Amino acid sequence: MGLLSNRGSFNKGVYHFSRGEYLVSIDHYRKAVKKAPGDAQAWNNLGLSYYKLGKIKDAMKCFDDALRISPEDPFALTNKAALILAGGRHGEARFVIDKVLIKYPDDVHALNLKGLALMKDELFLEAHDLFMRAVDLDPRHRHAVRNLEKVRIRLASLEMLSEDDDESEDSSNLLGSDETDVSSNPRRGIGSDSDLEDDVEDLPRPREALPLKDRSDEDGDLEDSDPEDDEFELSEYDEFDDDTVDWEE
């Protein structure tokens, strides 16, 4: 069956996901991928629903299925990178995010997520630059704005530490110490991650509802769809903003 044969089930999944009804959204997205196994958008949204219920392995499998269909899909790539980052594999997460940024250098979600990965590796100046770029592109992106504030606080604390280090530099030399304190280097950080949360809490990249209109398949024939599905019309969902969950540290 063609991709549009699953449009009603997909849109119902979008609707229930937006209402926080994740078990119901899973039922509809599973119907969607059963009707159209090659629908990367449905696999991505199914993964998000599993993630919301704490089913991380199932979520990752869905993102991988989406990427097998569409290897450069920025939604599935960013969501997969977020799960990898939450699992503590910072370098691997940055590698996946870079796949998005190579093709979409102005992707605000990817810029913000890579900034978080850099913060995890205590590369605060680099993280600051990415958050700045994200905020310049979208001043309303509240997660990037908050993360920019956090990294600025961290850099400000590093500057104060650097001043203290300068005052004690002579006495350190008298003691014959050859060790270099990485905490004095703003590009490495202060060696403490205590005020950063351990997990990336939100994956804010669901696909919006599909337009409910007739399309023809490659042979020019109208595709059949479930009449029960088609009677359920939705407007587009451009963003799902759950105030109880943040894509930030």
Image (cartoon, helix red, strand yellow):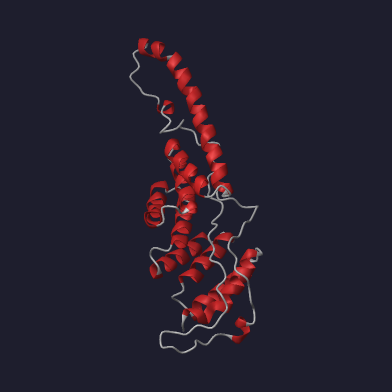
Q: Residue at x 55, y 60 (%)?
A: 51
Instruction: Give 209 or 96, whichever is nearer the viewer.
Output: 209
- Going by the picture, which residue comes out furthest to the bottom? 221
Identify the image quadrant of the C terminus.
Answer: top right
What x and y, as percent, mark residue 240?
60, 60
Residue 236 in which image quadrant: bottom right
Residue 219 visible to an observer of this rendering: yes
Q: Residue at x 40, y 70 (%)?
A: 69
Residue 249 visible to an observer of this rendering: no
What x and y, as percent, mark residue 49?
57, 64
What x and y, as percent, mark residue 115?
46, 44
Q: Is residue 209 left or right of residue 174?
A: right
Residue 15, compared with residue 153, is above or below; it is below
Instruction: Give 245 or 52, whichever is nearer the viewer.
Output: 245
Residue 26, compared with residue 137, is above or below; it is below
Instruction: Give 22 or 208, whichever is nearer the viewer.
Output: 208
What x and y, as percent, mark residue 78?
46, 57
Instruction: Give 213 or 25, whichever is nearer the viewer.
Output: 213
Q: Residue at x 66, y 64 (%)?
A: 19
